Amino acid sequence: MALTLDQVSYRYAGGAGVTGIDLQVADGELLAVIGPSGSGKSTLLKLIAGFLAPESGRIEVGGADMAAVPANRRNLGIVFQNYALFPHMSVAENVAYPLKIRSVGRVERLRRAAEGLAAVGLAGFEDRQVASLSGGQQQRVALARALVFQPSGLLLDEPLSALDAALRAEMRDEIRRVQQLAGVATLHVTHDQEEALSIADRVAVMMDGRLLQVASPRTLYDQPADARVAAFVGLANLWPGRVRDARSVETTLGVLACDTAGHVPGADITVLARPEAVRPLPEGEAASDLPNLFSGQVGRDRFLGSIRRYDFATPAGAILGETAFRGAFSRVSIPPEAIRLLPPDTPTARGST
Ligand SMILES: Nc1ncnc2c1ncn2[C@@H]1O[C@H](COP(=O)(O)OP(=O)(O)OP(=O)(O)O)[C@@H](O)[C@H]1O
């Protein structure tokens, strides 16, 4: 395994930090770490990079224990949000710098820098000054520099947050392409969950210094471990409820038909329905035998181009829906198979570390 964290904990003087982190990133894998501000993402990255030393637990890079290995000997490529390029050096000198400090000869390092620049789409930029490059180009240079010495792992700390939305979308695909080309284990810390879901092999969700779930983007979205993950990744209807029998649950919204396999009658649960699963019924459409049918009215209705996102007010509570349907409706149904049962969202489950 290229990167391994085994029960890693760290605490700042003020008490915040990370607790009991278990994580593995394989060669060629891109693992994104997401979580609210202050959840410990950067702390995790600093621990792996060697800028902080764990209080307990073990960090391995390429199978070797990093406990006694300083940051500059960990063989990790790092890309920061602010690029951290050397302004007084040319583009080629920037990219070649990690090879220079590894005593690679000038000809060879300039050859490899040129190769690295070509890999990030900047062939011919060797002699440019970094200040003359756009933000996206500077980030490509930073990526080439982080990979030029064939690191055991690549750490990306919010690398795209300084870029505008369109460039961010382009650059995230570019990062993925270059990362796959290099076949390097990558840990990518980001605020942007769309970025994480779209390019990561797996996504780790952090909250209050702990990992709540590490899973593929689809599993994370379709089978979140609990209500906190469900609410953080995408939009969610979450209703507290109790299992009635094998085919239904009681919720604040009323009785909902769904598969309750794995839960005993009487058990407290949280019911999850994603907004796109909520189905509006066009006026006049027969629906008498549809399960989980609600009458009400559309409240806030936001037109988002390809879809609209609406609040549907029923006498028992609100349902958040998303649909491409543009007509009027006063009934919605929630297909039983779209309903997931999660552990109850108790105050202790919400509590901090
Ligand atoms: N040098 C420090 N001294 C004391 N506490 C710190 C220090 N750095 C971070 N913290 C605290 O540790 C917790 C985790 O911070 P961290 O920067 O890892 O979070 P993050 O998830 O990366 O946040 P963001 O998304 O805002 O960058 C926060 O509560 C933060 O206030």
Image (tube, rainbow, N blue to C red):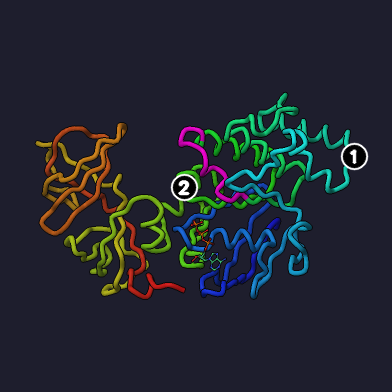
Specify the amino acid type for callout 1. Answer: Gly
State the residue at coordinates (76%, 63%). Answer: 70
Res. 298 mark: none
Q: Is residue 154 magenta?
A: no
The image shows residue 56 at horizontal and vertical percentages of: 64, 75
**C-alpha distance separating marks 2 and 1:** 40 Å
| SS class, disc 1 | loop
> In this view, which residue lies farthest toward the top?
124
Quarter of the image with the N terminus is bottom right
Front-most of residues 154 and 162: 162
Judge from the rendering whether residue 286 lies leftward or rightward of residue 274; answer left or right: left
Q: Which residue is mark 1?
A: 105
The image shows residue 340 at horizontal and vertical percentages of: 33, 58
**Magenta extent:** 156-167
| SS class, disc 2 | loop
For the residues labelled 2 and 1, say whether their Cβ atoms are less than 8 Å apart. Answer: no
The verdict on label 1 being within 8 Å of ligand 1 is no
The image shows residue 104 at horizontal and vertical percentages of: 88, 43
Q: Which residue is mark 2?
A: 192
Which of the 4 quarters of the picture holds residue 140? top right
Which of the 4 quarters of the picture holds residue 182? top right
